[in-house]
Image: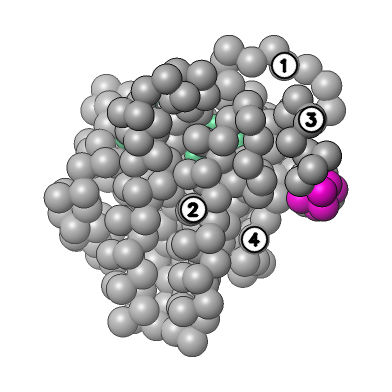
Amino acid sequence: MRKVLILGATSAIAQATARLFAAKGDHLFIAGRSADRLEMVRQDIAVRGAASVGVFAIDANDRARHEALLDAAERAMGGLDTVLIAHGVLSDQKACEGSVERALVDIETNALGVIALLTLVANRFEARRSGTIAVISSVAGDRGRKSNYVYGAAKGMVTLFLQGLRNRLAAAEVQVLTIKPGFVDTPMTAAIPKGGPLWAKPEDIATGILAAIEKKRDVVYLPWFWQWIMLIIRMIPERIFKRLSL
Ligand SMILES: NC(=O)c1ccc[n+]([C@@H]2O[C@H](COP(=O)([O-])OP(=O)(O)OC[C@H]3O[C@@H](n4cnc5c(N)ncnc54)[C@H](OP(=O)(O)O)[C@@H]3O)[C@@H](O)[C@H]2O)c1
């Protein structure tokens, strides 16, 4: 029975994943910035078999309360062995190009807040020599594109941070999982026209996340075919890439 903290628990992908943890009888501690939405998620998870569900309202960028979040999760569940970080914002690229403040706020949410919490979690799990850290990054972090490089740069920072963290925590046998979804039909992508085989449902991503945790994977592209799409994208020479409308 796992003791799982989810930050960004109101996200569609996180909710779908929380349901899977609940169905396995795990303890859950869900955190996010809207107390009302967290309560809705709590009620949903509670009837799906979770051993317990605790709630903590926090803005992910409120770094001063990150230790308190971890302490509360440990108190509520009698320990903590799995952390899933799921929150994020899809940047308005054009708005970020016109506003330094806007770009930095999004980088704070998508990268700096994540890295801040990861630093605390890593030290706790390293000292115990066990645990699973899973973070939702994105395929967007694999290569900068003109249409979304502010979001992509933040996700790329998270991906690279996790790579180093995994390298450090391997000796302590702590799993560090980087989750790279492609296009997922969630509120985050509500403004983007959808359809076609590249779009996945949050439930599909959740199934992939749980499987990757249980198989002790390091990096997972979800769905799997994004690994090959991104391999091709990364291989395109820069002199060609900069002329593409991607
Ligand atoms: N959808 C995709 O196509 C896609 C693709 C690749 C990666 N991802 C990543 O998957 C993760 C989950 O996104 P999703 O697709 O499930 O979208 P979503 O349903 O829109 O969820 C985004 C979540 O982030 C939370 N959030 C934003 N800023 C926050 C902050 N400062 N503090 C706390 N929570 C904050 C939101 O909270 P509120 O409920 O309070 O707004 C919301 O719950 C994100 O990291 C996203 O970047 C998504």
The mark nearer the N terminus, 3 or 4, is: 4
- Circle 3 packing at 10 Å, graded few (<14), some (14-19), many (20+), is few
Mark 4 near ligand 1 (CB under 8 Å)?
A: no
Any mark on residue 157, and which?
A: 2
Q: CA distance from mark 3 to mark 4?
A: 28 Å
Task: Locate residue 146 relative to residue 35 in the image: left or right.
Answer: right
Q: Which residue is mark 1?
A: 194
Kindly state the secondary structure of the residue where label 3 is placed.
loop
- The amino acid on which the numbered mark 3 sits, given as a three-letter code, is Leu
Mark nearest the camera among 4 and 2 is 2
SS majority, magenta: helix
Of residues 157 and 10, the one nearer the viewer is: 157
Residue 80: image x %, image y %? 33, 64
For badge 4, the amino acid type reads Val
Magenta region includes residue 236: yes
Residue sticking out furthest to the front: 239
> What amino acid is at disc 1?
Lys
Q: Label 4, on which residue?
A: 219
